[in-house]
Amino acid sequence: MKIYNTLSRKVEEFKSLEKGKVGIYICGPTVYDYSHIGHARTYVNSDVLIRVLKWLDYDVKTVMNITDVGHLTDDADEGEDKMEKKARVEKKSAKEIAEFYTKDFWQMIKMMNINKPDVVCKATEYIKEMIELIKRLEEKGLVYKTSDGMYFDTSKLKNYGELARLDIEGLKEGARVEKKLEKKNPTDFALWKLSSKDEKRQMEWDSPWGVGFPGWHIECSAMSMKHLGDSFDIHTGGIEHIPVHHTNEIAQSEGATGEQFVKYWFHSNHLMVEGKKMSKSLKNFLRVEEIKKKGFDCLSLRYLFLTGHYRTKMNFTWKGLEAAEEGYRKLKSIVSEWGGIKTRTNLSEEKLQKLQGVSLKFREAVENDLNMPQALAVVWEMVKSNIPEYDKWELIEDWDRVLGLNLGQVANNKQQITNEVEELKKKREELRKEKKWEEADEIKKQVEEKGFKMEDTAAGTVVKIK
Ligand code: AMP
Ligand code: ZN
């Protein structure tokens, strides 16, 4: 499989560190507000990556963080903790805020048919590991103290900023003009912030440097290395994390271990609204829940995401969603018709070639840096082809392990329902023979609830789709 690596800015052949195994860390949400469809896009993209690797028979371990402390309103280590701020506004505890919005996040994940990670780690439960990591950095002389906390000295690392291709000299020039912080270098960042004497924080811990709380970046370094080891295969996240968050994760992890932290960096481009990134702060966001309330199938949104490549921006419009819904519904309705075909017929040479051709094309599309728009085009080519329906059904069941559009299930459900209804019909006929009218009526109702109607004709009972 080929995958774009932000580190090299190239599409590379994917080679896992350990044969057949892949470790992936997914940068998780900061749980101080509702998840929106922008988040949904990024997590659908990482879900597709994970599904493809599993489809290619890799044994994949996935780890995701839940940021419930330390993410400040200003990325430059200033401002308030987003969690504490929201707790103050909503007059709740930070823990309650975290629990409420974490639940909302998982609901979104479920609605989008995204598989849950194997390991989920809350930052507040890994303070000990973060302190240990900062101590290691301190032993290596990479940390210095300021009046408000412990900072990482980025000038001590030869390749600091490599991921983002940061112009360190240019940044220094810019910082000279507005030097106001005690930081030695403009790119230095907080590892541990001390609690302010003036106000009492809800979330604070004792540490060798005083009572305080961890920086946002250290959590991801500590938790990913704890669960995936000092070096692992893939780290995912949105593109805005390249210059600061992920750059600093690399600095901390490689500063401590001397090993390469992550082999492949996978970044998703943004979902936009009228040219602006959909975000909590711009208040231009829309939740998956709202889309559902408007009568859309959430998986139409997933289908819409699959129509764009993960590395390109996508502009959200209702028209776009409507078109995706139309495409998805049409696909589902065609697929549902294949459920009843139970026997394989011998394929003619021409049809066999067609089947092998589409199988290869689908594989090539997903292996080519997850070209999902292309993969969807192959799905339609297959659907419209003259390949027998039994084989089409087998293909869609297999491909849906990657697409996650519940298409295999659609076909199976249809088959299952048809079988169940057939059983009920037989049972009802028996009951009618025994003149048990009430019980027979009850069965008729059950059948109708499954989307069928029953008609009693002179020739017997006929069941039709409603
Ligand atoms: P946050 O909770 O804001 O830290 O975001 C969690 C993840 O969602 C990050 O990887 C972000 O890059 C991603 N994300 C946030 N907004 C968008 C958006 N508009 N489009 C795509 N991804 C986004
Ligand atoms: Zn992170």
Image: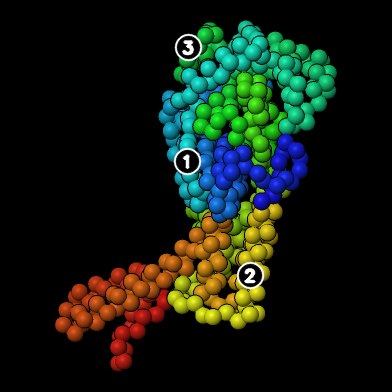
User: Which label lies toward us, 2 or 1?
Assistant: 2
Question: What colour scheme governs how the chains and residues are painted in the rendered image of this protein?
Answer: rainbow
- Quadrant in the rendering for residue 255: top right
Can see residue 83? no
Q: Is residue 247 left or right of residue 417?
A: right
Pick whichever, 300 or 405, lies toward us: 405
Pick whichever, 255 or 463, lies toward us: 255
Question: Of the residues shown, which amino acid type is indicated by label 2?
Answer: Gln
- The residue shown at (64%, 62%) is 362
Residue indicated by mark 1:
118
Query: Quick one: SS at disc 3?
Result: loop
Quarter of the image where the C terminus is located: bottom left
Judge the density around disc 2: few (<14), some (14-19), many (≥20) Cα neighbours within 10 Å. few
Question: Of the residues shown, which amino acid type is indicated by label 3?
Answer: Asp
- The residue shown at (31%, 85%) is 461
- The residue shown at (60%, 81%) is 348
Q: CA distance from mark 1 to mark 3?
A: 30 Å
Q: CA distance from mark 2 to mark 1?
A: 34 Å
Can see residue 116? yes
User: Which label lies toward us, 1 or 3?
Assistant: 1
Query: Quick one: SS at disc 1?
Result: loop
Q: Is residue 392 left or right of residue 159?
A: left
User: Which label lies toward us, 2 or 3?
Assistant: 2
> Where residue 285 appears, x then y in whole percent?
60, 43
Pick whichever, 210 or 102, lies toward us: 210
Please report contact status of discs 2 and 3: CB closer than 8 Å, yes or no: no
Residue indicated by mark 3:
206
Residue indicated by mark 2:
356
Query: Is the CB of mark 2 within 8 Å of ligand 1?
Result: no
Judge the density around disc 3: few (<14), some (14-19), many (≥20) Cα neighbours within 10 Å. few
